[in-house]
Amino acid sequence: MTETLKVHRSTEELEALVSLANELLQLDDYDRMLDAVVQASLSILHADRGFLVLKDGSGLAFKVVRNWSRDELEGLGEPISRSIVAEVLSLRQPVLVEDALSDQRFSKTDSILRKGIRSVLAAPLEVENRPAGALYLESRSLDRLFDPDKLDLFRRILELSSRALESCLKRILLQQRNSLLERDLLKRYNFPGILTNDPGFLKILETAAQVAPSDLPILVQGPTGTGKELIVRAIHLNSARANRPYVTVNCGAVSPSLLESELFGHLRGAFTGATRDKTGLIPAADTGTVFLDEVGELPKELQVKLLRTLQFGEVQPVGAARPKTVDVRFIAATNRDLQIEVEEGNFREDLLYRLNAITLELPPLRDRPGDILLLFHHFVRTAAEKSGRPVPKVTPRLEQVIQDYGWPGNVRDLENEATRLVAVTPAGEPLGVGGLSKRITGSGVKVAAALPTLEESERRLIQLHLKEAGGNRTGAAKSLGLSREGLRKKMKRYDLA
């Protein structure tokens, strides 16, 4: 085969793969995706007929069939197809029969001669690293026998398809789980802004819902960005104080010299600049809830005063001779380990005991793997709606990178990246790894997939057309069906300029 013919064939194959990737990207229906995979496989590999089966309990179910009679499919077709499908699913490896008439395994099989089978390709369809089914193709033409090159192309089709199907399945499962959750825990209680399918996090929500009606102090601990404030707010909304004041105090955001006055209030003349009485945040929350955010930042001298409020339900404004009674429920949050702070002498042990009648430990996002894509798609949808744009599609490759990244800033970090991706991606285009922050692409996450993603295929396709056109962009753009400006933008996007 000449070099020009090789390039031409490679170009055709890449165009077909890009076309399949684009089609799968536009489909949300699992059955239609399966149909597209079979149809593309027949066309790209010039097969005469084929079928796709999926595991169904202990057996197999035909999902897509092309150019096969109903009688032939009884008992999963002929012995050759039955044995090959069984081998593919058992070994989880593709099978290539280049010429059945010269293959000792099948040359004496009656169906080979009777049905005119000359060449066979079959491979497992894997979803989440498990064989979900198999795709089987046949050729009856001597001049269209399958060979190792066709097998390699077949692998690429299946790998591309598996990623798209896996992404679709995850979306379906998330929708099903969300429906169940809405009828259960998240339906029975008021948890605004909280999305989860994670069993451990659901357990935390269940505990929060159980203790919300009480007046017990609660300590919520967890890394920055894990949703501590949302949990605290949910506890208040599910308590008997839901319609009463809810006051937030960030203990680390106010200077120590002003914090006492902010918390407890002061009388006129209590200190220089105190020209009028001031009601503190704790008295202002009387009959309601006080949220002490970053309570680990509270200065040691104020810890004593807060302890008295927790013990006796009293506050004493700065400059006041006597305390006054308040009815307040305290919920505190911190990203520090307060037990270590106690051991290091930074936090009072007796105050810790008063605050943590109930402790809720929120995990980092990396420990909630089932929630990462759920939250990501939610943030993408929210960002698109806020900007008045249609909700963009997300490439399977980007989903894989999002799933694999460690998210050191947790949910807040994920939200920021999703919002950023929507902002930097042109309207109407799918979100892809090309728009990711450098901190993610340079983090060691496996951004490059084995074979072939839409972005990779399109990049290579542009390179091939440029090579065929001798570097002439006008000619390459014409052969690609693009305007010169459209080609320029894509070359810039893929660092080909």
Image (cartoon, rainbow, N blue to C red):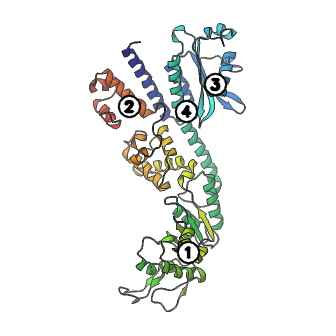
Looking at the rendered structure, which numbered label has been put on residue 345? none
Residue situated in front as seen by the camera: 414 or 51: 414
Per the model, the C-alpha gap separating discs 4 and 2 is: 21 Å
Of tags 3 and 4, which is closer to the observer? Answer: 3
For residue 189, above or below residue 215 = above
Q: Amino acid at mark 2?
A: Arg
Mark 2 to mark 3 CA distance (whole Å): 32 Å
Task: Look at the numbered discs 4 and 2 and tell me whether their residues touch, using CB distance below 8 Å.
Answer: no
Horizontal and vertical percent position of residue 334: 52, 66
**Mark 3: amino acid:** Val
- For residue 459, the mark is 2
- Point 47% across, 48% down: residue: 381
Residue that label 3 marks: 88
Going from the N terminus, do you reach mark 3 or mark 4 first?
Answer: 3
| Contact check, label 3 and label 1, Cβ < 8 Å | no
Mark 4 secondary-structure assignment: helix
Q: Earlier in the sequence, mark 4 or mark 2?
A: 4
SS for tag 3? helix
Look at label 1 and name its amino acid.
Answer: Gly
User: Mark 3 to mark 1: distance in Å?
Assistant: 64 Å
Displayed quadrant of residue 68: top right
Residue at image point 48% right, 51% down: 407
Q: Earlier in the sequence, mark 3 or mark 1?
A: 3
| Residue 95 position within the rendered picture, expressed as x and y whole percent measured from the top left | 60, 21
